[in-house]
Image (tube, helix red, strand yellow):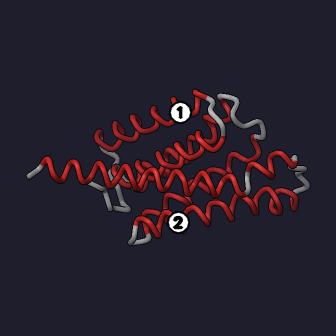
Amino acid sequence: MPNNSLTKKFDARFITRTAILLAITIIVQFIKMPQLITGSIVNAMLIISAYFVGIWSGVSIGLLTPIIAFLVGLMGFPILIPFIMIGNTLYVVLFKTVKNNIIGMIVGAVVKFLWLAASVKYILTWFNVNVPQKIVAAFTLPQLATAIIGGILSIFLIFILTGYFNKSKE
């Protein structure tokens, strides 16, 4: 069931599954819930898409979600879009490349958090970008929380879905 290939061919199945998971993610973003809920679900979708469809599915969704968040008004600081894209990519790639899903998710969550926190606290200030304190607060510990909660949710769903599909084959 899971796709473990790092070199995924972009066939109709890949595109269709990625599009469905992206559509679910977009719907979640349009609902405009608190950051803890929306961010956790988006992070769960990144892991679920990487696990079931492949690393490039998770990366693709991770590259599109910050753009969508900006377009639907969830994010008013567009200079952060490339930093979020990189953070999402790190999360997915580390989840997929570390052999143990739980450890991969935790490592990915911590690295994503460290990247985003460093981005708003240090990297952007090197370029004389004044990052509002409200943005700094949203891109530090809440990012770790949403990545961990989303990761736990996704691992739980993966366990349920793979257990269900494995039993149905018997």
Q: Nearer the viewer, residue 142 or 98?
A: 142
Residue at 80% across / 46% down in the picture? 135
Check disc 1 and report its element: helix, strand or loop: helix
Residue 22, compared with residue 96, is above or below; it is above
Q: Position of residue 102 (x, y in %)?
A: 44, 66
Other-residue count near label 2 (Cα within 10 Å), few / some / many at <14 / 14–19 / ≥20: some
**Circle on res. 106:** 2
* Amino acid on which disc 2 is placed: Ile
Residue type at numbered disc 1: Val
Per the model, the C-alpha gap separating discs 1 and 2 is: 23 Å
Q: How many marks?
A: 2
- Displayed quadrant of residue 11: top left
Residue at mark 1: 28
Q: Position of residue 9 (x, y in %)?
A: 32, 52
Crowding at mark 1 (Cα within 10 Å: few <14, some 14-19, many 20+): some
Q: Please indicate whether residue 95 sits to the left or right of residue 145 in the image.
A: left
**Mark 2 element type:** helix
Q: Is residue 20 left or right of residue 128?
A: left
Residue 42 against residue 140 in the figure, above or below: above
